[in-house]
Amino acid sequence: MVMALLSVVVPVFNEEDNIEIFYDTVCEVLTPLSYDFELIFVDDGSTDRTPLLLDVLTQRDGRVRALLLARNFGHQVALTCGLDHAAGDAVITMDGDMQHPPELLPLLIGKWEEGVQVVQTIRKTTEGVPWFKNFTSGMFYKLMNAMSKVHVQEGGSDFRLMDKQVVASFRRFRERARFIRGMVGAIGYRQVQIEFIAPKRFAGKSKFSVRRMMHFALDGITAYSKLPLRMAFYIGIVFSFISFCIAVHVIYIKVFTNEAVPGWSTATASVSLLGGIQLLGLGIIGEYVGRIFEEVKQRPLYWLRAELPEKKK
């Protein structure tokens, strides 16, 4: 009897201090289970010893594979690469910094055995994270859900299990601005959620800078909502009406009264305000046009520098 295969996809970027402990812990958790498994690391252009450590692991353990991207493409693209190459009957995606507890893997697999096709984990909180980061994260999800028809669960993470049928459907989504949490939420199938508290990173620092988080948030909003474009249109209508009222008032003062006084301040304020609104609208439109530009070039999402272990010719 052929055992089902589990694929564990792990994007890594400069995680030399976490690779060994992550590998040992995942193998310790999965080995007793009645499944074969493969561990697929996707190196997202690391500049430290991460690729060398992955090479050693692939030589030591035939269950380990490593996909080395040619440069840094970002976390979401690295996840996509791993999902493209996974061969499992179920595929689990998780980060390699130990903030996605490997001890939860049997619980995710148990839900899959019950017939659930997507087991999504929900991060209630992260140990040691400043309140400001938790606050901004919560505000992002509230804003995202208010602006989009696709519901994205607050606290949703990229730690999840997907059945091979779901993975096959996911592979058909090839947009460049990838917000996988929204994509999985919109993909359907039978889904269930599991809450967890994320521990501190085992070692190293988070690679999600403020700039990366802002870019990630912008990807999520523009990928699933046209509301910013509509808001620019509605704001334009409102201020056009206000401008019309001001124009009527100016004409009335000029024609029917003697109180018309040359006033540069009002004109300057009005022009500045309307100019700012116009620039805001153009900026929103430009963001969407820029994303269209990226899509129509139809470049590949990623390309590999090497695959470990190297295939024999």
Image: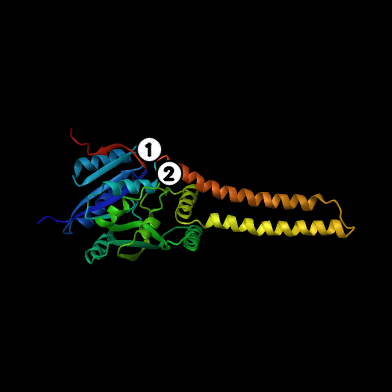
Say which mark, if any, is on residue 174: none
Residue ID for mark 2? 295
Whole-percent x, y for residue 115 in the image: 24, 65
Of residues 241 and 63, which is closer to you in this image? Answer: 241
Residue pictured at 30% horizontal, 65% vertical: 190
Q: Say if residue 163 shows up in the picture.
A: no
Residue pictured at 43% horizontal, 42% vertical: 296
Q: Secondary structure at mark 1?
A: loop
Residue pictured at 33% horizontal, 48% vertical: 80
Of residues 312 and 39, which is closer to you in this image? Answer: 312
> Which quadrant: the N terminus?
bottom left
Q: Which comes sooner in the sequence, label 1 or label 2? A: 1
Find residue 43 and report its image quarter. top left
Residue ID for mark 1? 71
Whole-percent x, y for residue 113 in the image: 21, 64
Q: Secondary structure at mark 2?
A: helix
Q: Looking at the image, which residue sits at the far front?
A: 255
Of residues 103 and 280, which is closer to you in this image? Answer: 280
At label 1, the amino acid type is Arg
Find residue 109 and report its image quarter. bottom left
Rounded to the nearest angstrom, the CA distance separating label 1 from label 2 is 20 Å
> Which quadrant: the C terminus?
top left
Q: Say if residue 310 shows up in the picture.
A: yes
Whole-percent x, y for residue 61 in the image: 19, 45
At label 2, the amino acid type is Glu
